[in-house]
Image (cartoon, helix red, strand yellow):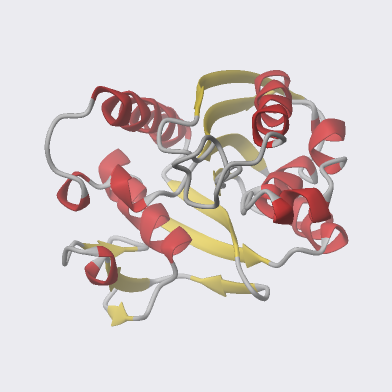
Amino acid sequence: MIVQAVVVPQPPLLVPALSPGVNAELEALRAACRTAVGRLAAVTREWVAIGAGDHERVLEAASGSFRGYGADVPVRLSRDAVTPADLPLSALVAGWLREQAGADSVRVHLVDGDPAECERLGKHLAHGDRTGLLVLADGSNRHGPKSPGSEDERAPGFDDAVARALATADTAALRALDPALAAELGAGGRAPWQALAGTGDDWRAELLYSAAPFGVGYHVAVWERG
């Protein structure tokens, strides 16, 4: 079963080599992510992760690199991974966070946009082996005039609702997220959040971070059972 769940965003800039220099907003985000995955590793060193993908698939025991994002930073999904693969961003970030926290392995499940499939995956993981869950999910990329997706006045309300749901373990609110609206707002995290909602309702939650410092909504939360 999933004994603890952690929600983090997946921007490449979490990796210091990809965004060197001092930036207070970025360091606050990184610190929250370090705290969250550190707490997950303290509970269990065997992780599963959920990220968004074009189709459902599972990645494990592979190695990759952030080379395509500006620096050849190697990552492995497990301590003994030797098989090179062209890992998507969510798997790269999952592998990098695993290494930062000292966890043994992370198996990455990619989910497509279908809410029913997200719910099914969450239920499946909830009844599997004792493990920790890492949810990789970005909010809207349309915060402010300099945002990557261009400004949309609906973005703050959308991410405020997500933050409230993550802060209170409100799985009903996560299930109710509108796929069409999320797509319009460039919120790639909608499917992973809804997979998290499928893991059940017996959670207590803590929101460690919620902001849109670079025009994208980022949320960091820790969910613990009961």
- From what the image shows, is residue 79 above or below residue 20? below
Q: Nearer the viewer, residue 12 or 38?
A: 12
Where residue 142 appears, as percent x and y from the top left, is 58, 43
Image point (67%, 76%), residue name:
55
How many marks overall? 0
Where residue 82 appears, as percent x and y from the top left, is 26, 77
- In the rendered structure, the answer to whether residue 127 lies left or right of residue 210 reads right
Q: Nearer the viewer, residue 180 or 83?
A: 180
Direction front: furthest residue: 145
Q: Nearer the viewer, residue 175 or 76?
A: 175
Quarter of the image where one finds residue 197: top right
Where residue 118 appears, as percent x and y from the top left, is 77, 57
Direction left: furthest residue: 21
Image quarter where the N terminus lies is: top right
- From what the image shows, is residue 226 above or below residue 133? above
Image point (52%, 62%), residue name:
108
Tell me if residue 125 can be seen.
no
Where residue 195 appears, as percent x and y from the top left, is 73, 50
Image point (18%, 62%), residue name:
73
- In the rendered structure, the answer to whether residue 97 lies left or right of residue 161 reads left
Image quarter where the C terminus lies is: top right
Image point (30%, 47%), residue name:
13
Tell me if residue 203 can be seen.
yes
- In the rendered structure, the answer to whether residue 92 lies left or right of residue 131 reads left
Q: Nearer the viewer, residue 15 or 43?
A: 15
